[in-house]
Image: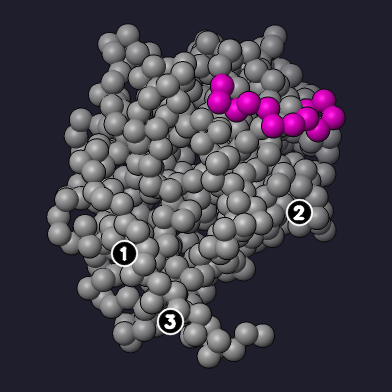
Amino acid sequence: MINNRYWLIILMTCLTSCSKVSVPDFEQAELLPAGGMTGKGLSDRSFVQVGRNVDRKQELLFWTGFSLFRDPWVIAPSSTKDRDGLGPLFNTRSCISCHSSGGKGPAPEEGNSIPSALVIRFGSAEDKLFSDPIYGDQLQPRAIAITHNSIQPDLLGEAKLQLDYQAVYGEYADGTTYILRQPTYHLTDLAYGDLDKRTVLSPRFSPVIYGVGLLDAISVQDLLAQEDINDDNQDGISAKYNRVPIAPSGHNTADFHNSVENFEGTIRLSVGRFGHKAKHPSLHQQVAAAFRDDIGITNTSFVSESCSTEQPNCQAASVIGGHQSVEIPDKLLDLVTQFNQLIAVPPARNLDSATAQQGRELFYKIGCESCHTASYKTDAEYPLKSLANQTIWPYTDLALHNMGAGLADGVNEYDADGQEWRTPPLWGIGARKNMRSENLYLHDGRAKTVAEAILWHGGEAHISHQKFIQLNQQQRNALLAFLDAI
């Protein structure tokens, strides 16, 4: 084991090297973090607004897509043909229930509950393609209410979640104390039998959706230019991009930017950029997967219901709805995708203040930018021209990084291992604090503040974490003021 004296020597060396870090000059463009797709103003009620680049025709499509995003789906068959097909097993009835006002959903409840915005994925430490034999890839805690002779026994939600927190106490170098929340997860009231012995729970709290179209518009070449799996530059950071399947789709541009890296048998693989472990290569595929996995709505990318062979009552319920093919056609799925593409990013707030500028300098000097890459220019050839050729400031490399044992879920997902997570974007992070149930951070929402989220950083981020610990209170406040402003 490395002793404390050794770590102190490393830390003092790193702190000394801070003064040698090159901090780029501040640009006025940073005040508009999404370029022409920056929102026209701020709201304490909703992130749902179109970017400045969006023309009237696109805006009409945006609001049409928003109606499909907002309104609850219902049981089929019904008179509401554009919104029926819910379940049979599902997590929630609408997109907005997990992404309230375009941000995050309601905070998970401590104790025994049925969650919505906190999704429980199933995986394993050994198999990157593992699904629980009974419960599949994801917990579906709700079920449609249906009376039919073929549905025996009654259709039930799969389980409830027991969520508990344990306090973790710590102290900054200046003596200021802090308390973190260490969560534990356990399923109760399992309706279809025990989980497989190999099954591991992976909690995933819903992310914000503003700016995702611009992340989709970054060229795959610009992302791969940052890959450094073996840390060849010896900076302690080993950016890695997940290689994930491209799902079949009737959408013409779903694979844009995601040029195929290789083949695995007959499966086309590409660079993942969406999801907490970068499971999906395109925004369209992410939206399609959410429809099937969260609401139980089949589509041309994911044509099968999420019922296992061990859930015959679910399978029986899935065939009585009257749909002859998938439950959401491509034309409607595309509208929801375009809504996600065109939602604006909040403008920066007080970013040119002296305090925020001091925090900006510290952000670079303590190494945050090593994973939270500040800026890109989106691809000039991206099909949706309002998103093309934009200078953006999302503060993410969209790569996988080892975040240490404290944040590990122990689940492999394609090339992501049990300690790796995709770097989340930071733009607009300060604008979330005025939204209901928005003030939660990290992949499972355990952190109530940005400072708590930083304090959980380990693995590749350990040195930056230690540098943050060494800052005095005025410096910490400045760094947090910068993050609040971007």
Q: Residues within 10 Å of mark 3 (few under 14, many from 20)?
A: few
What x and y, as percent, mark residue 314? 74, 31
Helix, strand or loop at mark 1? helix
Which SS class for mark 2?
Answer: loop
Q: Residues within 10 Å of mark 2 (few under 14, many from 20)?
A: many
Q: Amino acid at mark 1?
A: Leu
Mark earlier in primary sequence (1, 3): 3
Image location of residue 457, percent across then percent down: 49, 65
Q: CA distance from mark 1 to mark 2?
A: 38 Å
Q: Which residue is mark 1?
A: 362
Q: Residue at x 24, y 38 (%)?
A: 29
Q: CA distance from mark 1 to mark 3?
A: 16 Å
Q: Image quadrant of residue 290?
A: top right
Mark-to-mark CA distance, 3 and 2: 39 Å
The numbered mark, 1 or 2, whose residue comes first in the sequence reads 2
Find residue 124 and name its label. Answer: 2
Towards the viewer: 89 or 459: 459
Q: In the structure shown, which secondary structural element does the residue marked by tag 3 occupy? A: helix
Give the overall secondary structure of the magenta segment: loop
Q: Nearer the viewer, residue 2 or 117?
A: 2
Range drawn in magenta: 256-267
Q: Name the mark nearer the viewer: 1 or 2.
A: 1
As drawn, the residue found furthest toward the left would be 353
Question: In the rendered structure, are the residues bearing label 1 and label 2 in contact, judged by CB atoms less than 8 Å apart?
Answer: no
319 with respect to 289 (left or right): right
Q: Amino acid at mark 2?
A: Ser
Residue assigned mark 3: 12
Whether 364 is drawn above or below 97: the answer is: below
Which of pointers 3 and 2 lies earlier in the amino acid sequence? 3
- The structure residue drawn at horizontal position 52% and vertical position 55%, both measured from the top left corner, is 444
